[in-house]
Image (cartoon, rainbow, N blue to C red):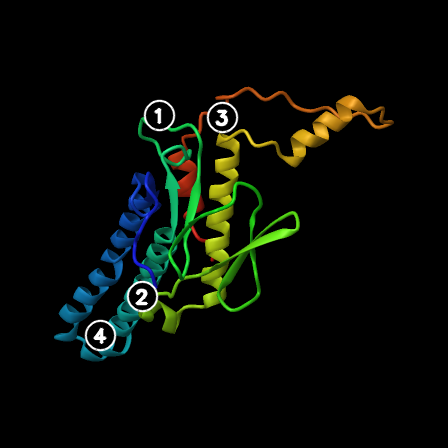
Amino acid sequence: MAEENLPNGFLKLSEIESGKNILKSLIKKFLIPITFIVIGLVTYFSFPILSIMFILPFSSILFLVYLIEYYKKKFIISTIAINLGHPWVEEEHEVDVADVAFKTLEGWSILPHKGRVKDNLELNELLIEVGSSESIFKIPKVNYFVDIVSNKKNIKSEIIKWLNLALALRDAQNAVEDDIEKARDREDGEELDVQRIWPETNPGDLRVKPGAIFRNFSKSKK
């Protein structure tokens, strides 16, 4: 498998500020099982059965769960990269066009400027269809520890969600025409019996920082 070779001007999601905050929040969770482990060791001298049968096993399992989640999340956000023009990059820059890259089994690939990622249903492959053409991307090998205890389908599903969100924001940044805009144009140019009212959109009304969107999406649904 090819090593880094990250395209020029790209940053992995794990390297931008919002991505770092995701990993930091997961690391902070380790304080919970560590605290229980300390309590279990202290309790052992007075209540050995309680410590051995309940506190220490519970804290060990909790620690393992957080460890798996940390490595899984780190793997996922380390396989996706964005260039400086992408909305997730909050620093000042002069790049206007956004791009998204994915670290495949063979190395980094910049994703096509159209289409969305789908599950290719073939082992660990992702698919992007644009018209009659298609692009196939093989998912890189997961960390051995995560590979043993994690559900590969869940990892693939989460990668697809991350990639498609990154692509949607890329297209918004690049002002790519979407189906809603096409529908608006059709209604303006055709006589229809049903009248539809399109709400006015004013840029900046939501005042939501890209980093906030990033952090919200990072919270996995159980």
Question: For this view, does 19 lie left or right of residue 134?
Answer: left
The mark lying in front, picked from 1 and 4, is: 1
Q: Is residue 108 above or below residue 95?
A: below
The reply to whether dot 3 and dot 1 touch (C-beta < 8 Å) is: no
Quarter that holds the N terminus: bottom left
Who comes first in sequence, dot 1 or dot 4?
4
**Amino acid type of the residue tagged 4 in the rendering:** Ser
Who comes first in sequence, dot 4 or dot 3?
4
Disc 2: which residue: 62
Disc 4: which residue: 51
The mark lying in front, picked from 2 and 4, is: 2
Who comes first in sequence, dot 3 or dot 1?
1
**Amino acid type of the residue tagged 2 in the rendering:** Leu
The span from disc 1 to disc 4 (Cα, nearest Å) is 58 Å
Tell me the SS state at disc 4.
helix
Disc 1: which residue: 94
Q: 41 or 94, which is in the foreground? A: 94
The span from disc 2 to disc 4 (Cα, nearest Å) is 15 Å
So how many labels did they put on this image? 4
